[in-house]
Structures are given as structure tokens and as C-alpha cells.
Amino acid sequence: MTSGVVFDVREFTLHDGPGIRTTVFLKGCPLACTWCHNPEGLDPVPQIMRSSTGARAVGRRYEAVELAELLSGQARILADNEGGVTFSGGEPLAQASFVAEVIDLLPATHIVLDTSGFGGKDAFMALARRADLVFFDLKIVDPVAHLRWTGQDNAPILRNLALLEQLGRPFVARVPLVPGVTDTNENLTAIASLVASNRMLVRVELLPYNRAAGGKYASCGKTFAPGFDEDRAPNADLDPFERAGIEVRVA
Amino acid sequence: MNERISGLRARTRSGAYRAYRLPPAQDLTAECDAHGLSWPARMARLTRRQCEAERVVIGPDERIVFTRTVPTVPAVWTRDQQDRLAAGRTFHEGGLINNICADWGMALSQGLEGRRRVALASLERANAAGDAEAIEFLGAAIETVDAVLELAARYAAEARRLGMDDVADVLDHVPARPARTFHEALQSLRLLQAVVWLSGHHHVGLGRLDQYLWPYLAADLEAGRLDEGGAEELLAEFYIALNRDSDCYPGIQQGDNGQTVTLGGMTPDGRDGVNPLTWIALRVARDVGLIDPKINLRIGADTDLALLELASELTRRGLGFPQYANDDVVIPALEAHGYAPEDARDYTVAACWEFIIPGRGMDVVNIGAVSFPHAADTAIRAGLAGDWSFDAILERTAAEIRGQVHERVEPFERLLWAPAPYYSVLMTDALETGRDHGSGARYRNLGIHGAAAAGAADALAAVQRHVFEIGDISRRELLAALDANFVGQEVLRRKLAEESPRVGLHEARADELLRKLYDWFADACESERTPSGGIVRPGTGSAMYYLWLARGRADGPLAEPVVGATADGRHEGDPFGANLAPTPGTSLRGPISVLQSYAAIDYRRVCNGGPITMELSDSVFRDAESIRKVALLVRTFARLGCQQLQINALNAATLLDAKAHPEQHRDLIVRVWGWSGYFCELAPEYQDHVVARHLHAGL
């Protein structure tokens, strides 16, 4: 019996996969992207968020069976509506055995794994194998820049990306467009060539940077220091992808 | 919308037609007294004088005419006379029959001359039988028919004079004779309905428009007289016309006028009634984007998803409608309450949400509310003080509900309606039987709403959890905290509010209590009967009671009891959820659990209507894929066996901006409780409630 920490369970999440879905946000992420818009998802333990409207507990520990029961209660409705359950975060790979146990306890349900791709090979294999569709974030291809902006090396991410082909799991590559950081022509071109040959690629989605990202940092007792020009419009350039024959859209 | 329609819409929104308004109508009391007129004769005289007073107004680009110029409805009795008439009786909402739906299909297909012939035949029988009541009623009804015909003739003559021969030709034929085309049917409907308003009735519903108008449109399409585009243009003009005089309609706030339309659903003989006009009527409402008519859409578990997608585009537009009713649930519930199958299948939605029968219903669908929170709170406080078991608290809650139902019903045992000769002309059986619709209609039941059930279920669930199961709050402690409105008791209050089962989270304990509340409510209603044999229909709406039951009513007396702080951790004065909505402040996961919670209610027992009310952020509706998901959500509502659903697409920031800069948001429409209105035309306190509700309940 495993337990895990979840910072939110949201229903009718429209942009987390096909059909009507419920998304489980797992708490804790090994990356520290300076643009992260879910800072309450970073720490792996429950915490108190304080704001002008008062204090609020964020995150609670679930037994796998308890979370599975909650989700099972909706599984039929989700399946009936072309949807299912999405595991997002935070980073689901960081609580892979918990997530795997929850999935195994569910009736047949369409599963989306929404991941940064950063995690051990076994963890990734365990969850990707159980997923029907993977939302795989691709941020920066250059390892030095990746380390600088996310605090981690991207080697495990690139390795796990390659594993998807081996596992035969379809994936959507999701690229956050952070002004001057991820949206440069050379990075977008590098991402395009990285995924172009992967036969499991469904499409690429570009996610323009959301200016609201910094809003929650103070409530979490953190400082928002993006390190880039937030006011610059992101470069939503579809061209590198279209030239590579890849289906691409701006989400 | 073409240029003509855009122009009509713009002039209607700007209030340009008000320039034609006449001074207030002249009091008719003296005239009626001088002639010693009976009450039915006075009401007929009222309709006649109102028609005569109307000044004919035809704009150069109109094809469906009638613009109201008489702004008010005069009295036919002095205040003293009326008080004597109503002494010891309940004179509901001014005493004129209201919030019902005429048999428009019948009226269009017979024409007023046809109705006149029916009245004359009945009059002959009544004369032979010496039935004085029928003789008087039928004479009055015929007088109103003639008044409307004269008004139509004046419009026809003016159209002819202006050289608008197509309009004049239509008016030469209708409303006197049966409509032959879609254009004639809409023109006839416009005049027939406008005179109901002019006669002083309110909440004048338009019923199943796509059902009764489709035969006319189908014939036009078949004959090649009209194409779909032409039909849309005519219907758009008709919709716009419904918005032209609405400031003259009585209502609590402008917009609360009950000018509803019900589309789709089953036909009386049990077939799927969705037809091409259902789609056209939705498309036109989306494109015209005005608050009238308010659209209800009847659906079921297997309704075409594309129709629900079209409907969701109306929601996206922020119109606050359509409101959905689930045929799979509503029809069996009406049948279980004594409605004949063919009538139950023919239901339409009243001003807000109640299910009524066109032409045959004279139900008083909203006689007031039962405060579930007050019933539960009274029982909880007595139980805490008296060391009762939890079951004893539940029993007392049921008894309190019974008491409140009886208090609300009792005055309606002495209900008195003013005669309604003109409205009766448009009803299914009134002329045929020689009885006014108010006293002779087939269905004369009462409807009552059980309000703020989530608040009561949450309070009971919190007591059950913390006092009886875990025991981490003592009876004395809780009672003291309630009495103190939780001042200095924030830790205890949060325990009640945040660590208890709540409605909206699909938690068995809370949902079970929710179901029980409505079962007890239905039991209580079943024990009541009106003197004429009517039943009492329990419903799930709240209207403004979600506030009044918490704060009292500033603008008048309130029969229902007001409750203080409650055991769900709610402070005194904090509002409850509107209709079927979780208590504001509940940490919801989203709409699926909300629907699952509300699926717990046994809707076969609560047939009076009252929607699950959801606010979705307008960002939900950003693309076609999202629209499709909203449509799937609506279908889920039906498949879970819930009864009625109303979705509002709103953005709290937009509302706040509209409050600050009304001039930039003149067309912003919001759903208030059972009706839609222009946000900037609402009184400030109503605006604040809408904003607060959206901030709380945004899913």
C-alpha cells in the first residue's frame, strides 16, 4: 500500500487530453523552471498557502486505494464521454509507484501522463506503459541552457523521450513558449528535429507563456524571479515544425 | 443578421420605440361603475379599452408589426372595492392569472374568428341551460375577441396606407383567420400575445414554439415560398419585437418577465419532437443575442450531440440560456403527479423553471419556499440542547419541513383569481366548457420550492460527523459557537466547514441527507390538498430565497423564516447556494461531482423544477473542441438522471469592469435566478450577488 501527495484533483479539465477528464495534480517536482505557474506543486509535502483571503492548506496525502476510489466513482462517466484521467503535477514520475498503483486499481480508463520527462528510467517505463497517451514537455534542447533555466540536466528527459518509441506509446510534445528562453528559432528547430523522426509523435503543441505565472509565488513563501522579459510576446513560430512535416498547433 | 435586422435590433436596444409611448392609461373604475359592470365584464372592458387606446406604429422596415404605446394597465376597481372582493381570500401577485402558457398552436390554427364561433356555440348551449356564469364569461370573451380584431384592422389599414401591401395582406388575414404561412403565424402570435400583456397579465410564456410553428414553416419550405434564410430573418424580427416593450412588463427587475420559449423534447404522442425549426430557433437566438425570449431546451440521454453543441454556443455567448430540462426525468415525474401522459409529454417551462402544461395548466407554481436550513437548524439546536440522538434530529427536521409546507399552502386554500376572459380565449378548453381558465382549467395545482438544500444537508452532515461520529466537538461547544456566530471560534468553524462531507463533492453522507430532505419535503407536500382537489408540487428552485433566507428581505415582508449561523460553519447572513448549487465557499473539484451529488435526489417525487446551477469561466468556451466538451457535460447531466440544468458562462473580471464602466458593457447579459437580464440594468445589490456567486462558484 502506497500513499502519495496530491495538490489538487480537478474535474472537467478541458486542455489535459481528449474528452471529459479529471486531472490529478501530484505534488513535488524535481525541476525548478523559473516560469513555473504552479509553484504550489514544487514542494513534495503538504504546505500552507497564505494570501489576502486567508490561509489555505495545499496538498494532502492520499492512500492509493483512497484516490483510486474517488476516481473509480467517475470512471464510467469519463469513459462515456471520450475521456479519462490525467496525471499531472508537479511531476508524476516523482511519485511513480503511487501513481502506478492508483492506475492499476482503476477500471479500464483512458490515462494521460502529463510529464516533464524528468525521472528515472524505471519510473518512466512504469507510468508510460500504463498511459494511453503521454503529454511530454520539451523545453530546451541545449543541455547547458536547460540546466540554467530548470536546475536540471536534460539527459534523462531525452532518454525517456526515445523510450516512448520503444514502448509504442503515442505522445504529444508540449513546448512552453517562454520569451527569449524556449521560443528562440534555434531551440524550436532543435525540438522539431528531435521529435520529427519519432514515429509515436502525434503532434506538437506550443503553449504561450502566461503572464499570471508569478501570481502565486508570494502565497507559497517563494520569490518569483523569472530572469526573462515577461512583457515580450512569445514567438509562436510554427515554421520549424511545419518544415519538418510535423502537425503543430498553438494551445 | 442582415442590415434590416441589425437596424431593428439596434433601435430596440436603444429604446427608440419609447418615443411613441402615450401617457398612462385612464382609470376605468368610474366607467365600469357607471355601467354597473360585473367583474368579468370589467376585465373585458379593460382589454377593449387598452386595444382601442393603442396608437398604430409601423416602422418602414418592419414585416411583423405591433409596438406597444399604452405604457400601463388601468384599474377596473377602486382600492376599496378590490379590498372588499379579496377580503379573506388570497389574491396572488395582483390577482390576474399569470405564469402560464396559452395553447398558441390552437389559437393560430383556429384564428380569432374561429374562437368566436366556438364561443357563440357554447353561448347557445349556455342560454339553453340557463347557465348564467357561462353566459357572462362567454359574452366577455367575445368582447375581447372583437377588440383584438379591431386593433388588427387598424394596423392593416395603416400598413395599406403606407404602401406596405405584403404586411397589410398578412394583417387582413390574421389573427382573424387561421394562419397559412410562417409569416402569418408569427404576426398572429405577436398580436395575440401582446394583448395578453396589455390586459395586465404577467409572465406570458410562449411555450413550444418549434412545435406549433413548424407545420407553417414546413409548408412554406415545401411550397418554395420561403427558404431557411428567410425563416431565420422572420424569426429574428419576431425575437427582437419581444424585446421592444419589455420595460412595460411587470417584474421584480427588468428581464424577469417570463417570456420563455421551450424547444425540442417529446411530442404528445411520444415521438422525438426535434425538427428543423428547433435548430433555427436556437441559431437565431444565438445570433440576435437579446434576453428575450429566454430559451429552454428539452433533452434526454440520447439527444443529438450536435444540437447540444449549438446550444452551448448560446451559453458561450453569455446569454444565461438555454436552460436544459431532462425529458427522461420530467415526464415520468409529471405523470406520477397526476398529469395525463399526453399532457406530461407536452410540458413547457414557466417563467423560471417550473414545468407547466400549455393551454391546460393553471398551476400556481411558486407559492413560496421552504427553508431547509431553518428546518435543519431548528432541529440541530433543539437536539444539541436536549441531548437527542441524530435520528431524532432528522425526525424533527422532517417535522419542521412539514410545518413550513403547511404554512405556505394554507393561504392558497383561499386563492381568488380575477376573471380572465381574453387569456381564456387562447386556452384549450375555456370557451368550449364556458368556464374561465382561472376556475375551469384541467390542472390547478400548487408548486412550492425547497430552497438551499445543500446548506441544510451540509449542516446535518457536519453535526453527524463531528458530534456523533468523531466526537471532536461537544454539543455544548457547538451550540455556544452557533449562538456566538462563531466569533472567536474560527478553528471550530473551519473544522465544520472544511472537514465535513459537503454536497457537491459526491460524498455519500451529504448526498444521502440531500436526498432525504427532498423525500421529507415530498412527503409533506403529499399530505396537502387544495379545496379544489389540487396537489402540491415540490420543487428545487430558490429564486431570491438563497439570499432572503439568510438575510431577510429589505424590500418587503418575508413569510419564510430567516436563519442565523449554521452548523456547516456558515456565518449569519452569508448566502446559500442558488437553486441546486453547493454552498458558496465549498472547495469543489468540478462539475462532475456536483452532478453526481445532485443525481442523488429522487426527481420523480419533485416535479416542480429548479435547476442545478453552474457557473463556468468563459475561458472554458474558447474553441470548437471545448464547446463539444460542454455539450458532453450537458449530456452527462441527462444521463445521470438529473432534472434541470442551467449553465452560466461568466468572467468575474468582466462583471467587475461592467460595474465600474457600465457604458462599455451595455449588452452584457447575466442569469439572475430563473431569468436573464442586462447586467448594467440590475440594481446594485443584484449586481453584487451575481459577482459574488461567480467568484464563489466558478468551477
Image (cartoon, rainbow, N blue to C red):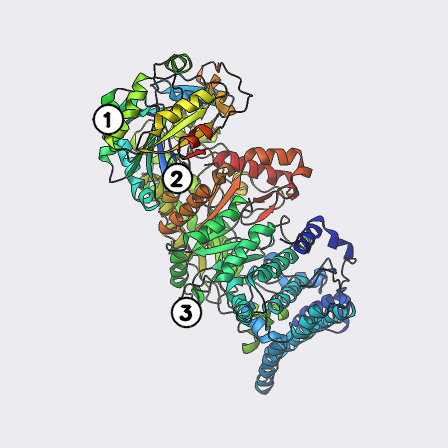
- Residue at left offset 38%, top offset 22%: A41
Instruction: Judge the density around disc 1: few (<14), some (14-19), many (≥20) Cα neighbours within 10 Å.
Output: some
What secondary structure is marked by label 2? loop
- Residue at left offset 62%, top offset 33%: B657
Please provide percent x and percent y for residue A73: 30, 40
Q: For the residues carrying marks 2 and 3, which lies nearer the camera in this image?
A: 3
Name the disc covering residue B621, or none: none
Name the disc covering residue B503, or none: 2
Q: Amino acid at mark 3?
A: Asp
Q: Amino acid at mark 1?
A: Met
Residue hosting label 1: A125
Q: Amino acid at mark 2?
A: Val
The chain letter for the residue carrying disc 1 is A
User: Looking at this view, is B430 or B136 the one in front?
Assistant: B430
Q: How many marks?
A: 3
What secondary structure is marked by label 3? loop
Residue hosting label 3: B269
How far apart marks 1 and 3 lie (CA) works out to: 58 Å
Please provide percent x and percent y for residue B206: 56, 61
Instruction: Judge the density around disc 3: few (<14), some (14-19), many (≥20) Cα neighbours within 10 Å.
Output: few
